[in-house]
Image (cartoon, grey):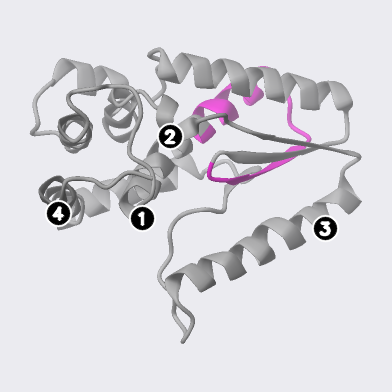
Amino acid sequence: MQIINPLVYVALVHKITEQENWEKLQARFEKFSKNEKIKCLSIPIQSDSQQSDKAQQISNWWAQVEQQSILLSLEYDYIFDTDVADCYGSIYTHSIAWAVEGKKIAKANRNNNLLGNFIDKSIQNAQNQQTNGIPQGSVLMDFIAEIILGYIDRILGVFLKKQKITNYQILRYRDDYRIFVCNHNDGESILKILSEIYDAVWLQAECK
């Protein structure tokens, strides 16, 4: 758990929620979620009932992850369950800009005028200019992590299509993956590809 400098936190929230920037992020999440076989179930939500936001998130996790896993286990023969060790602490902050803007655009415009570069630089400023890791323990950082994880979802979908792996379903809750397949070799291949993508993204991968 890390406490972020309040000035940095507030500035980030204001920047992200500007109408143009918010619409940009919504468009990116729509792009990340185009592959219906890879489902992100951990986007922070606002409760629409008397439940607290946290309680609503837990209820959604139970319905969409646990119960959905039971249903998928009836359809598929194998389940592979994995998560990323020290996910937040391993994130390369420049990958935030790549996820928001696309790598080529972010690298060609290394100023804070772009939303992705602004988020990247703000997090560096909160961590003595370190580019490895993002603070853990706030809804804002969970949201920023989801931008990167969604980017990885998209890369994974592209790789699986190239490998002609089509009979699968993946449920992702933050950095926890449940991979459902009918062919054991497909499951092993997906795990391998996923591991390689994480290594590549932390070390400067590219996907539009």
Name the quadrant containing residue 193.
Answer: top right
**Could you tell whether 109 is left or right of 90 in the image?**
left
Q: In this figure, which residue is indicated by the disc labeled 3? A: 71
Query: What SS does tag 1 mark?
Result: helix
Query: What SS does tag 4 mark?
Result: helix
Q: Which numbered disc, 2 or 3, marks the residue that appears first in the sequence?
A: 3
Q: Position of residue 133 (x, y in %)?
A: 35, 28
Q: Amino acid at mark 1?
A: Val
Q: Which numbered disc, 1 or 2, marks the residue that appears first in the sequence?
A: 2
Residue at 82% x, 58% y is 71
Q: In this figure, which residue is indicated by the disc labeled 1? A: 139
Q: The magenta stretch spans which residues?
A: 153-174
Q: Which numbered disc, 4 or 1, marks the residue that appears first in the sequence?
A: 4
Question: How far apart, in angstroms, are the residues tagged by discs 1 and 2?
Answer: 13 Å
Question: How far apart, in angstroms, are the residues tagged by discs 2 and 3?
Answer: 30 Å
Question: How far apart, in angstroms, are the residues tagged by discs 4 and 1?
Answer: 13 Å
Q: Amino acid at mark 2?
A: Tyr
Q: Which numbered disc, 3 or 4, marks the residue that appears first in the sequence?
A: 4
Assess whether mark 4 and mark 2 are in contact (beta carbons under 8 angstroms).
no
Residue at 40% x, 48% y is 142
Question: How far apart, in angstroms, are the residues tagged by discs 2 and 4?
Answer: 20 Å
Q: Position of residue 149 (x, y in %)?
A: 47, 36
